[in-house]
Amino acid sequence: MNAVLAIIRRDLLLAMRRKSEVLTALFFFIIVASLFPLGIGPESALLRTIAPGVIWVSALLATMLGLARLFAPDHADGTLEQMVLSPTPLGLLVTGKIAAHWITTGLPLVLLAPVLGIQFDLDVGALGVLVVALLLGTPLLSLIGAIGAALTLGVRGGGVLVSLLVLPLYVPALIFGAGAVESHISGLGAGGHLSLLAALLALAVFFAPWATTAALRISLE
Amino acid sequence: MNAVLAIIRRDLLLAMRRKSEVLTALFFFIIVASLFPLGIGPESALLRTIAPGVIWVSALLATMLGLARLFAPDHADGTLEQMVLSPTPLGLLVTGKIAAHWITTGLPLVLLAPVLGIQFDLDVGALGVLVVALLLGTPLLSLIGAIGAALTLGVRGGGVLVSLLVLPLYVPALIFGAGAVESHISGLGAGGHLSLLAALLALAVFFAPWATTAALRISLE
Amino acid sequence: MSNRLISWFKYASPQSFYPLAGRMIPWFWALTAVFGVIGLWVSFFVAPTDFQQGEGYRIIFIHVPAAWMSMFLYVVMATWAGLGLALNTRLSGMMAQAIAPTGALMAFLSLWTGALWGKPMWGAWWVWDARLTSALILFFLYIGFIALQAAIDDARRADKAGAILALVGVVNVPIIYFSVKWWNTLHQGSTINLAKAPSMATTMLWGMLLMALAFWMYSIAVALTRVRAIILEREAHTEWVKDLNEVKA
Amino acid sequence: MNWGSPAEFFAMGGYALYVWGSFGVCAVLMILEPILVRKRQSSILRILRRERQAEILENP
Amino acid sequence: MLTATGLSCVRGERRLFAGLDLAVGPGEWLHVQGENGAGKTSLLRILATLSPPAEGEVRWQGEPVTVLAEDYRRAMLFLGHHGAVKEELTPLENLTLAAQLDGTTLDEANALSALMRFGLRGREDLAVRFLSAGQKRRVLLARLAVRKATLWILDEPFTALDVKAVDMLSGLIESHLAAGGMAILTSHQSMPLPNGRILSL
Amino acid sequence: MLTATGLSCVRGERRLFAGLDLAVGPGEWLHVQGENGAGKTSLLRILATLSPPAEGEVRWQGEPVTVLAEDYRRAMLFLGHHGAVKEELTPLENLTLAAQLDGTTLDEANALSALMRFGLRGREDLAVRFLSAGQKRRVLLARLAVRKATLWILDEPFTALDVKAVDMLSGLIESHLAAGGMAILTSHQSMPLPNGRILSL
Ligand code: HEM
Ligand SMILES: Nc1ncnc2c1ncn2[C@@H]1O[C@H](COP(=O)(O)OP(=O)(O)OP(=O)(O)O)[C@@H](O)[C@H]1O
Ligand SMILES: Nc1ncnc2c1ncn2[C@@H]1O[C@H](COP(=O)(O)OP(=O)(O)OP(=O)(O)O)[C@@H](O)[C@H]1O
Ligand SMILES: [Mg+2]
Ligand SMILES: [Mg+2]
């Protein structure tokens, strides 16, 4: 347990050192979401309709961009080798790393999403649902993404390959996440979507660290 | 001139070696464009309205992902140092690299865009305008992107930082590119937008390699 | 019991599977031809014209088999991959690798034929229908599997990494399917629902089944041929490969 | 029998483009795939034979 | 006591070594020698359980290392070609965090004294990326002074080090051996250490 | 003839060296010595025009190198700590493409013979990432044999090389000097080359 906290602390410290990375993921999120009004035009009714989808897709992409940072630096400088050789079980260390990834990538997105929602003219209730959906959804994205990041580790062109592996697996999160906001807006209530999202999250918490650990061991072989 | 061809050949050879990278950038383009309907909903009238914007934003993002590959590998393994020290003027080598980047990233996007257009139910005329706009726009994206890639070289977290620098610069390309298709659809004719895009391209061909070279020298110092 | 286990493992070694596959391939090609010819004959000459869709419906005779095979092959591929991970047999990974391209081909064919069908029927090449969308995602999963394996040089590592991806995919495919379905019904976007396709004449069903059998046999034949090539590539340095008749010749 | 003449058969009741487009691409791909696989097989066999030849030459 | 029997290693089509036996007991060290590309690094990675051998088995105190897993990893310390130091952290942070990941804690005083010992005085708070090639290497080697392990597996530990640092490091290895430790090293230069057995690949 | 006058180098708050003068004429070589972190790499990078000096000036045949630019770069070859080889290309491709980027062409026979000379027979067609540490280094050094340059600036060229390769490389440097070339080297080991002047940092 101590080691998990240590690795979270370490990754947060590293993130502080290269602050620009964390901030840039955030700005990426904002910029991508803001590109749409530019590409599509300013009608606010149209924008309100597409808002949940656009915000969620932007969150997906921002998370995905951060995945390259998840294991690759540790792999390149040999730290990952040392982790595998460490007496602490690898699974724990991996869980710690995923948690740190969520804190540095997912959490800021959740906090920032309302601002974007306001840009797209969403009302307060919809903003609340958006935040809750992202709060459930972003850890899911980190967990699934970690599998992809581990699989593509040390593979040439891994940085782009990971998107190919991970984006299709993100589809349910996207559908339920954006769906929650949409069905709230259309008056149907977001409960169903949100509980499905929570169920997926529970499933992923259980399986993803295990699959990630297995994938890491394979890529180090 | 010989050296330019040599570097284009070298970069294409490298791209062949890691074929998966080029292909994956393509699939990234397709997947991102396909995510939007999943986030927004399947109504085809709505989708047709947002299609040009979505396709252009996806092209922007796919190009941007490839930027990390533009100079970073050469920088990491010291090849870039050798290029700076090479008797061939750096500007020529840089031009070659940008050309190779467009051939491996931009050109495939142009060829694939009609398929996406069909998914979004665009008609044949609109598809034609889309292709022409991308044909003018993607070299522009490569040229502008190269400046960003050079500036963020060797900077920690450069991979994400580059998106922050480059995406705002891509806005004019996005507006005129997506605008061309939209104004064709609404019957206004795409000529104005396309010629603006061509003008931007001419400007960039002139200035971007020069700026990139300067930026490269700075980041190597 | 123990006897059967041993012989099973014997055929799980590439060395004994290679000739066995060689002997099986012609039979599967023959079956492909037989089912294919009868199936085509039924689809074009026996099955009646559809009263709603005219002759255009005949696409169904390849569309549905391709769609079925694309889903079935994914499960088969993941099973082999999982076996490889669990039992550490070399052949399993090679089988998974051999099946993937054929699976991707089937997924592509179902999309292609579906699109060519949709145009006359719905007036659009593509709609974001639940089934179409999940078929598209399945295609992406295949491509991801192939790209991952291609990107890893070491064959054993590629097998294991691919296996994990395939297994994660197998857990996800149903989730994706249902989520897409739900997404689609909520929006009530598409006007035509595939599930409400016209009830089929028995001859149509027969044609479809025969073509599905032909596709199935085809997939087995191609996968076996490909696995033989993979075995040779991977075992090139072993003695038994050097002693093969086709190498000596 | 549904068809009066070959021409009718090829016209497919006006759906020729779609039906033949489907069956055609399907046929092409399903012929191409085995050919490519055979090529892969024969190219690895060729390499193996060449290596064997070289080995024989080196230590007769 | 580390023993390995019948180890063989295949890379690509190439068999690097086969039927290799070795044994290292308390107080002993093994010098793995061989030309460039002979397979020294590959052997060390097998001994460290980072990659599996094509054939053969590695045993620690009589038990196969695959069975021991964690216990073996606790007893063993592997330092390879790679830095395994984070470029944006300082040497001090690198050292304390590495200890925490191993499940132990290292107080600042100990960490500082290890760094001093490795001649990094005045660089404790400079990010590692500013350090010179040899200084980076020293940060890595400082782990030897703080992590308790019985078996040291070091791949070319003397690379990039200046004369003073080489002396320091060999002194450290000697006292490790004197205390009953074991070491497996590779190096292309003659070793400034007595009594090593030599394994030629 | 390379001359430098009054060079000084500042990194962060630290002045690594100041008022440094040096001169290397045809047939001469300079051995830059110093502890880890003394500033050897920094000096070499200044001489190679990769970073500007804080004070002082570097001249080539009497002209400042900043003025000569391309001409100086054509006459000079710098090989640093970094590999500067592409991991996914083969040694052969690496060598020919490096030559093309320098604006010369290298036919396959010459490239192959350079590789043979560096003991890479049988590895010409293996991607560099599969090579061992020493083999990677050899691919880089093979450029010495194919690129014509008067001044060689080599940062720790003997790292990771085995005894045979060290002999080979020093032979190469000797014949370069005998032909009127110049060389500036760093190394922590004693150099297997005669007649070097020593510059201690
Ligand atoms: C790009 C377009 C299309 C794609 C990707 C697609 C995909 C699929 C898939 C994956 C299946 C198998 C599903 C299952 O058996 O559960 C299927 C079956 C079927 N499709 Fe399509 N389809 C497309 C267009 C169409 C069109 C336009 C029609 C009819 C107007 C159609 C009618 C059918 C029918 C009748 C079945 C058989 C259903 C059954 O046996 O249960 N499809 N399609
Ligand atoms: N896929 C492959 N095909 C053929 N040979 C390979 C392959 N991968 C690695 N090799 C060879 O395996 C060897 C790996 O050696 P290793 O890294 O263990 O050498 P080493 O003894 O540590 O050398 P050095 O002294 O240079 O560090 C090299 O000779 C390399 O050429
Ligand atoms: N920002 C900084 N602040 C303080 N010191 C710095 C800074 N950047 C670099 N240094 C110091 O500058 C020196 C760089 O030395 P350089 O890399 O030239 O050493 P070197 O002689 O090549 O050593 P080695 O033998 O280890 O390769 C190191 O001592 C390093 O600690
Ligand atoms: Mg080695
Ligand atoms: Mg140095």
Image (cartoon, coloured by chain):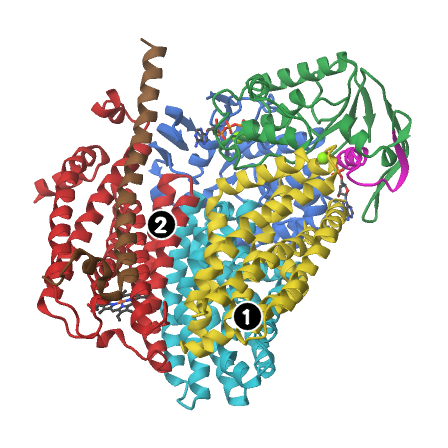
Chain colours: A cyan, B yellow, C red, D brown, E blue, F green
**Residue B7 x %, y %:** 62, 38
Relative to F10, F84 lies left or right: left
* Image disc number at residue B53: 1
Residue behind label 2 places its C-beta within 8 angstroms of ligand 2: no
* Image disc number at residue C162: 2
Ligand 1, what quadrant?
bottom left
What amino acid type should be assigned to the residue bearing mark 2? Gly
Write down the chain letter for disc 1.
B
Neighbour class for label 1 at 10 Å: few (<14), some, many (≥20)? Answer: many
**Residue B111 x %, y %:** 49, 55
**Residue C66 x %, y %:** 24, 58
| Quadrant of res C43 | bottom left
What amino acid type should be assigned to the residue bearing mark 1? Gly
Relative to E159, A151 lies left or right: left
Q: Which residues are magenta?
A: F38-59
Residue behind label 1 places its C-beta within 8 angstroms of ligand 1: no
Residue sitting at 66 percent across and 38 percent down? Answer: B4
Disc 2 to disc 1, how far (Cα)?
A: 35 Å
Secondary structure type for disc 1:
helix
Residue situated in front as seen by the camera: B212 or A189? B212
| Vertical side of F157 occupied by F193: above or below | above
Neighbour class for label 2 at 10 Å: few (<14), some, many (≥20)? Answer: many
**Residue F149 x %, y %:** 74, 23
Front disc: 2 or 1: 1
Relative to E146, E127 lies left or right: right
Residue situated in front as seen by the camera: A77 or F151? F151
Relative to B129, E6 lies left or right: left
Number of numbered callouts drawn: 2
Write down the chain letter for disc 2.
C
